[in-house]
Image (tube, rainbow, N blue to C red):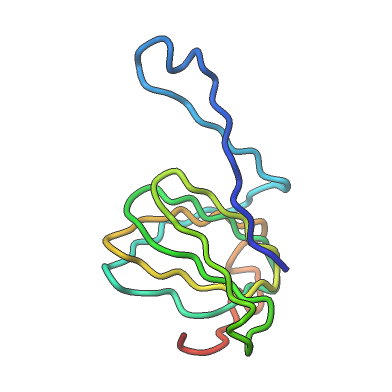
Amino acid sequence: MSIKVIQPFCNLETIRDGRGGIFTWLPKEPIVEFNLLFFKPGKTRGFHYHPHFVEYLLCVEGNGVLVTRENKNDAKTETSISLSKGVCTRADKNTYHTVYSINEMTLVAMLTHRWDDSKPPIVRVDDK
C-alpha cells in the first residue's frame, strides 16, 4: 500500500517553440475511466480506500493535501503530499487516503477499473 508522486517529462521542443509546453505522465497500468472532482475551500473527500483499482490523481487547479496512512488506526503512520497544479499521484489498491482542499481545487481522478464495475468502489474508514 502506498501513494507516490508521479513525475512528468516534457518535450522541450514544445516550450522552445514559444507556444507553452506539453508535459506527459506515463501510468504503470491502463487507465479505463477518469473523473473530474471539484472541491470547495476547506472540504475533504473522507478517509477511504479503493479495493478494486489503482487511482491516479492529477491536480489541475487549486491547492490541497493528500493524506495517507499505512495503518488506518495509527496517526503515527500518516504522511502527506502537497497538491498543486501539475502534481500527479498514484495510490495502490487498498491504500487509506483522504484529500483536503485549501482553496477551490479541481482534480482529475483516473482509475484502472471502472467505478460502476467495482463492488464496492470505495470503502469509507471514518469521517476523517
Residue visible at 52% across and 55% down in the picture: 57
Q: Is residue 28 above or below residue 13?
A: below
Q: Nearer the viewer, residue 115 or 22?
A: 22
Q: Residue furthest front?
A: 76
Quadrant containing the N terminus in the rendered view: bottom right
**Quadrant assignment, res 69:** bottom right
Describe residue 58's horizontal placement relative to residue 43 as left or right: right
Q: Position of residue 28 (x, y in %)?
A: 72, 46
Q: Position of residue 29 (x, y in %)?
A: 72, 48
- Residue depicted at x 47% and y 26%: 22
Q: Residue at x 60, y 57 (%)?
A: 111
Question: How many marks can you see?
Answer: 0
Q: Nearer the viewer, residue 19 or 113?
A: 19
Whether residue 100 is situated above or below residue 21 in the rendered picture: below
Q: Position of residue 93 (x, y in %)?
A: 70, 67
Q: Residue furthest top?
A: 17
Residue 64 image offset from top left, x and y in percent: 39, 62
> Which is more toward the observer, 6 or 39?
6
Q: Which residue: 40% across, 9% down?
A: 17
Residue 17 to residue 103: above or below: above
